[in-house]
Image: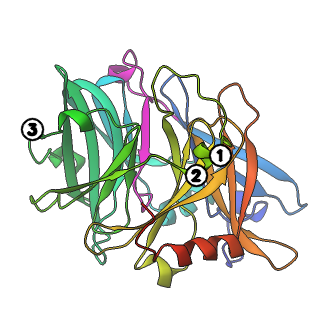
Amino acid sequence: MDDEEPRGGPWLKQNPVLPPQVILLQLDTGDSVFLMLRQSRNMEWKFISSRHRVSKSMDKKQPGMHLVVDPSSRYMAIGCSEGLFAIYALHPREELKKQYAHSSNLRYVASERHIYLKGTILKMEFLYPAAGDDDHIILLVILVFKGKSRMLLYEWQTGQDLRDIRAHNQRGHLLDEDHRMPSLVIPLTLRSAFILVFETFMAIYKGLLIGSLEIYDFPLRDFRYEKENRVLPHHGLHSEPLWTAWARPTRTPQHARHHDEIYMVREDGLLILLDTYPEDNLLNGLHEIGCLRSHCGPALAVLDYNGYDCSSGDYLIAGGESCIGGAYLVSCPVFLLFLVLSYSPSFL
């Protein structure tokens, strides 16, 4: 929470300062709901929500099929199922503090821009800018049109008029046939790189921004927990279970400067950890963490954990369709063991 004391204004005198975090929810109507939790002076908790209405041009195209927020929380993008997506510039925190001083009904969206395109929107993700270039905003859109998948890249600077945003190349970058239907797109914090995840392999993409694209494929098969029959039975239409979700754990700034770690879960409950770093092909290690013993869908979150017994680790929350999901702790000793093993050349 902010250290500053609330002062000034009839609303602010009876309410604490603006909470440090806001959850963005997307409704099936297309409207966006910004939700925050505040604690009053008598220690009671209350949810406060603010809604942003979708424009009529998006109303009949399943708005909200895609929802992404840039790493700095200054922009968000909402995609329809096809043909249209919107970019929203969000008010900075200082402006929200001023609004909160007078009312709990905040206006988060400062401006918006609708971009029309041909085809079905398959994936959308904001990429991370290079170190020291925090005002650089990068949006990746993967589009399917006439049986071909293409990547479109949109770049702009913070504060730039949204009407000036254009794709690098209107035709986009054509994906190879075996890369055209990824189940996950994972932006990496290093080199503005990203990962496309498929059933049996993943591909690391780097250099797209500078026009010298490099692609490295890595297998995602033959895991130990599969051999021991410790994953749940797979009854899907595909020969291999799909990778359904990913989440980035919290790490110290010193470690995050040279490593980007990603948890990835499969629909049969298999959990792995990817360790990437900025050299060569970016993959430093791929580690099996275990089996969650629950079918998993797209819901996965990681919280930092500090236990009462002075232990620490990553606290995972996973959920799926028609199953109970669960909460899991990857303790610090286990995690350190996997880091040691990552230096073995035989992990793949």
Q: Position of residue 163 (x, y in %)?
A: 19, 44
Amino acid residing under circle 1: Glu
- Residue type at mark 3? Gln
Q: Can residue 341 be seen in this view?
A: yes
Q: Which amino acid does label 2 sit on?
A: Arg
Instruction: Identify which residue is drawn at 28% across, 49% down.
Output: 139
Which residue is at the front of the view, 55 or 71? 71
Q: At x 40% / y 19%, what residue is drawn?
A: 59
- Residue 326 picture quarter: top right
Q: Which residue does the numbered mark 2 point to in the structure image? A: 224
Decide whether the magenta segment is chiefly helix, strand or loop.
loop
Comparing 34 with 328, the one in front is 328
Q: Tags 2 and 1 in contact by the CB under 8 Å rule?
A: yes
Q: Is residue 172 left or right of residue 97?
A: left
Q: Is residue 190 above or below residue 197?
A: below
Left or right: 190 with respect to 280? right
Please tell me how crowded label 3 is: few (under 14), some (14-19), or many (20+) other residues with Cα within 10 Å: few
Of the residues tagged 3 and 2, which is closer to the observer? 2
Disc 1 crowd rating (10 Å Cα; few below 14, some 14-19, many 20+) is few
Quarter holding the N terminus?
bottom right
Residue that lies at the very extreme toward the right in this rendered image: 42
Q: Which mark is residue 176?
A: none
